[in-house]
Image: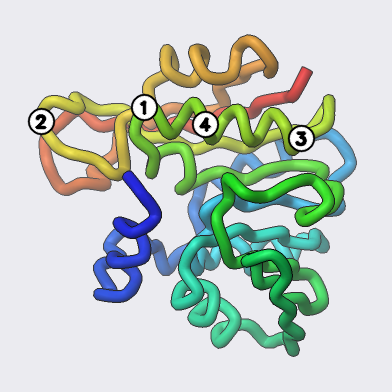
Amino acid sequence: MESEFWLERWNENQIGFHQTDIHPMLVKHWSALTQPRNNVLVPLCGKSRDMHWLQHQGLEVVGSELSEIAMSDFIEDCEASFTSRTVAGLTSHKAVGYHLIVGDFFALNKSQIGAVDCVYDRAALVALPTEMRDQYVEKLQNLLEPKTEILLITFAYDQSKRDGPPFSIDQQEVERLYASWCEIQVLETVATDEFGDDNGTTESCYRLIVG
């Protein structure tokens, strides 16, 4: 699932994955993160309105997104004045409470995102096929400091009955990817009709703590 796939989806407005409402699991479980929180990293953020909710909690939202269209749409929806700067192929849009970065997430380093206290992942891990998940998790591991907390939301379903994205990420896959470097806590698992089919789909929310 290369960059061109997602850029084409945004260019053609094929963004059924975008949610206009704040994710209920974010609202319900954000307080489960217990470490001090000043900055939150939102990888592959799209134009998620969840970022507005996080910023309204008093956090600086560090959003990373490949598509300039997605980021422009989000900025247009903000009641904030942004300044922009492009360095080494990455464009940063900054305003009070926001640091939005347009470019390849896998090219980011710590100096570009700054210190982050926590991560919110609703749409990043589930967007990636198996081989890219490993690269994504390795990148997160390189970016995050010990004790950083991650709020992770995933779907699990019979992958043989439908194609991703979003891909099926069950608890076994979460443990494969994170158990060696994070403490894992399952906060909630519920049945969902997210895909409008009878595929036994569940949605889960995890709290991960970097060791």
Q: Is residue 33 visible?
A: yes
Are the residues flagged by discs 2 and 4 in contact, CB closer than 8 Å?
no
Image mark for residue 42: none
Location of residue 80 in the rendering, given as x and y in whole percent from the top left corner: 72, 86
Q: Is residue 27 visible?
A: no
Identify residue for label 2. Answer: 161
Location of residue 126 in the rendering, given as x and y in whole percent from the top left corner: 40, 39
| Residue sticking out furthest to the front | 88
Q: Which of the two marks, 2 or 1, is nearer to us in this view?
A: 1
Name the amino acid type tagged 4.
Gln
Q: Which of the two marks, 4 or 3, is nearer to us in this view?
A: 4
Tell me which numbered mark, 4 or 3, is placed earlier along the sequence. Answer: 4
Quadrant for the C terminus, please.
top right
Callout 1 secondary element: helix
Name the amino acid type tagged 2.
Lys
Image mark for residue 130: 1
Image mark for residue 144: 3
Name the amino acid type tagged 3.
Leu
Q: Residue at x 45, y 65 (%)?
A: 21
* Position of residue 50 in the picture relative to residue 86 (left or right): left
Image mark for residue 135: 4
Q: Which of the two marks, 2 or 3, is nearer to us in this view?
A: 3
